[in-house]
Amino acid sequence: MSEISRRDILRAGAIGTALVTANAVASPLDGERMLPAELDKAAFAKALDELRAIVGKEWVFADEESTASYRKSEIPDPDGKHISSGAVAPASVEEVQAILKVANKYKLPMWPVSTGKNMGYGLATPASSGQMILDLKRMNRIIEVDAELGTALVEPGVTYRDLRDYLDEHKLNFWIDVPTVGPIVSPLSNTLERGVGYTPYGDHFFMQCGMEVVLADGTLVKTGMGSVKNSTTWQAFKWGYGPYLDGIFTQSNFGVVTKMGMWLMPAPPVYKPFMVRHANSDDVAKITDTIRPFRMNNLIPNGVLIMGAAYQLAMFNRRSDIWDKPGAIPDSVVQAEAKKHGLGMWNTYFALYGTEEIIAAIEPIIRGAFEASGGEVLTEKEMTGNPWFEHHKTLMRGGLSLEEIGIVRWRGPTGGMVAFAPVAPAKGPETIGQTALAKEILAKYGFDYAPAYAVGGRELHHIIFLMFDKGDPAEERKANDCVNEMIVRFGEKGWASYRTGVGTMDLVAKQYGQANRDLNARIKHALDPNHIIAPGKSGVV
Amino acid sequence: MSEISRRDILRAGAIGTALVTANAVASPLDGERMLPAELDKAAFAKALDELRAIVGKEWVFADEESTASYRKSEIPDPDGKHISSGAVAPASVEEVQAILKVANKYKLPMWPVSTGKNMGYGLATPASSGQMILDLKRMNRIIEVDAELGTALVEPGVTYRDLRDYLDEHKLNFWIDVPTVGPIVSPLSNTLERGVGYTPYGDHFFMQCGMEVVLADGTLVKTGMGSVKNSTTWQAFKWGYGPYLDGIFTQSNFGVVTKMGMWLMPAPPVYKPFMVRHANSDDVAKITDTIRPFRMNNLIPNGVLIMGAAYQLAMFNRRSDIWDKPGAIPDSVVQAEAKKHGLGMWNTYFALYGTEEIIAAIEPIIRGAFEASGGEVLTEKEMTGNPWFEHHKTLMRGGLSLEEIGIVRWRGPTGGMVAFAPVAPAKGPETIGQTALAKEILAKYGFDYAPAYAVGGRELHHIIFLMFDKGDPAEERKANDCVNEMIVRFGEKGWASYRTGVGTMDLVAKQYGQANRDLNARIKHALDPNHIIAPGKSGVV
């Protein structure tokens, strides 16, 4: 922290407490749960009583059994640094406000989750032990869908499944855009995490419009047009007037978002999914350079996935079906196995949307470019029934699927998987460098390289799923070391993550520089002087 | 301000000074310039000396003659509330940092401008008198254009003309997206104001990627990926990691933006501009309902303008050419005059971009819908040579034109024009209500209704240009009263402005509610404790 801003913050007040919250070691509560360092058991018990008075005793979870589901984590946590003290589940905005009052009184930090399915990043577990889970699942109303404008206003506990069902039930001809494992995920929280999907509405934060936020002191703020009396524009116009604030509540701990507006895609008359098959690992550079111009001129309008075969095989197989030796699976084995299933080493999925005539006008241009890159361009004609093609066909029309959950159990029935997602410009040479570096580091630890590249526009997210057996403590520690090394060494080359798990939030924040951290710290302290909302989220204390 | 946040802010420190800055009456300096209330002439003279030591004496402007250009304003200011004390023009980021140090020392507020062409909103004049203009025009480098990614990194003083010339000179086949009067305007400042243009890249803030910002204490922050060491992704990926901050520096006084990344549109092989002519004032509802689905499904990819004939006539005529009586021009007169020039009462401009085949596939769908709405769909075949068609044909391919400046002189050679721009959902009935209300209020003051509707997506901006004669003090006061009444009465119906002139920033901010204002005030105070950057901007002190 620079001298100037540290001074400013110290002058402002309670930063001492806050730094303690983040750095201090939590103390055990009952073996399975942890207490914030500043709180003793008696104070915690009193806080629980006050929380029970707000939400009713059945909605405060503070024993080993009732908190078990909140302690589940699929990512490595070898030293138990992400263990909550319990959970509280409010039913309304007023209850959220009352809970934050108690949190301020007792300096009991609250980690908000919507449905707690942040897969690859820690599910519902907090950035530091002792925080209480503020579980918003009971706030699950679809408040409004505007059938003319194609907009929705939802609460945190609404899932993509809920929204899909609502649209079907009301015969509203809109598509939604879902992340993988969409059915059980909350659109609100996926958007706040800046997650992506695979229709033309794939950049969820781009397609978000208006929020309601509870600040740490209980103040209720509506962003954009939401605070204008009698406004009918809250879900229609994103930017509002004056500083545009929605962004500071994403990947953030500056407030608790209790409502969010989002845009829905009108269902197109015709939808045509494509797969392009490339045979070799190095082809990813040519694929990237082929896609980039089509994303820039929007001839390909959706978020394109370049799926690595190893990732795809892991969806529907256990590792032992394919390879029984230690060390990373050789490319040749992946390649051979993939071929059996009609897959290349890279399989690129995109789609066209419109009328028959529009698609017929666009298809030859894209087809020609992909063929020139050495790819085989395939459609339903050739691929119907192929489970991977069907999976992406579903995703690219905003359909719901849980099939990708399978990869978590690649190494063993206990499961174990952590996502590492560095970003780069969408340029071929960047992919060659990234793939080589990922393979080198993963192989050093004996893990398989199971990648996808998501080309959002001018940038690509390299999504590397590190699959390990969480039932094996030694392997869990290796997975932890491996993901840390990937973050550090990719970071040295300028490839920082767009999102990360609760165990590595601070590590990634460092890569974004001290000035950035100080700025976040100043805003955090201005809005949450007791630092009770999710300290450590994105490395912001 | 709520009790809680007022208490927090007071606890934090120097708010007293800041409130004085905003509310106190500035004192005259030499008749034409004003001094901030807290400063006496001797202190101001010392501040000027320190500023001269930073930028050289030729770049500090502090006498009647050299500051004349900064005092120009086309909007009403009947009581002289927007008169700066002078101007300082740094050549580098380091000089901006040094200037802010002096500003903090003397509590001399600085109002940043890029090229000072904020037409309809006050040009380079500040929200309150006595502020010094921080004129960034000398920082005018195009730092980088990435020919593969189609991105640019520019400084504040770069104009759209500069950028166009650079692309032409380097034979880079990209389009830019310009607001009206684009040649003399800065892309950086237009984007910070959340201005719009008329190609598919028309939402400038949407197409912005990465900023460099100097905070009030001199801290230099790069947003998004810009602060990652060795990153090549600063202009490729918007969101970065952790809270997304760029938005808080738009329509804002939280920092001085010194560099900005932006996306460039690949030039399409074929471009086809359209005009749809509708005969009657009420047709705007049908037009809006026809456009909305095409903006939602992106068959019309650009920012559509529904131009009112009165606005269009004012571009190339003086009022006395058409009507010589007091009171608003009757619709029948506008309609008759428009007809002479091949215009209807509403003339809607949009375009298609792509290949011949793609455009041929889309055109019949749109043509059919507009014809069903009672419009005549016209293209270059019928309209080539029509000055209004040629103007919009230029705008919709990001071409440069100064033709709209003509409207400023509608009422007289001195000029005088203020823009009022309320937003609404893109639904027909909203336009009927807005048009009726605007006509009623304007007629009450004897002004003409010269409108356009810009349909950005799911929302529309109603752009009402109030044209008056600034050479007539009584008319200037009437114009001021009229725009204030429009803001208040539209606001009562929930139609608040997306942007407003320096004279009405506080009035509009009130419509966005107290919780929103308090939140902005808390962030402002955390980042700029002496409130020296543009106090009053967007109503944020």
Image: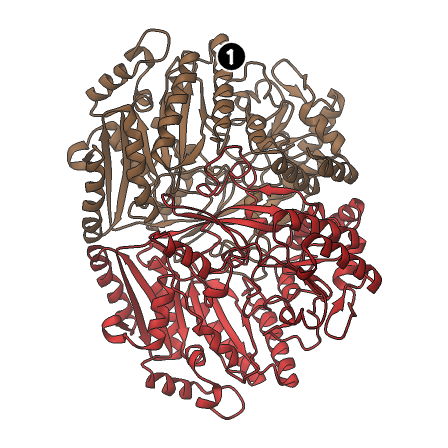
Chain colours: A brown, B red
Figure quadrant of residue B55: bottom right
Q: Where is residue A10 in the image (x, y as percent from the top left)?
A: 77, 36
Figure quadrant of residue B139: bottom right
Residue at horizontal 35%, vertical 40%? A303
Q: Which amino acid does label 1 sit on?
A: Arg
Q: Where is residue B20 in the image (x, y as percent from the top left)?
A: 79, 60
Vertical order, A203 against A120 (above or below): below
Task: Decide if residue B125 is in sight here.
Answer: yes
Vertical order, A337 against B302 (above or below): above
Task: Decide if residue A121 is in sight here.
Answer: no
Marks counted in the figure total 1
Chain of the residue on which disc 1 is drawn: A
B42 left or right, relative to B395: right
A277 left or right, relative to B179: left
Residue at horizontal 54%, vertical 59%? B193
Q: Where is residue B438 in the image (x, y as percent from the top left)?
A: 52, 76
Q: Mark 1 points at which residue?
A: A477
Q: Position of residue B10 (x, y in %)?
A: 79, 49
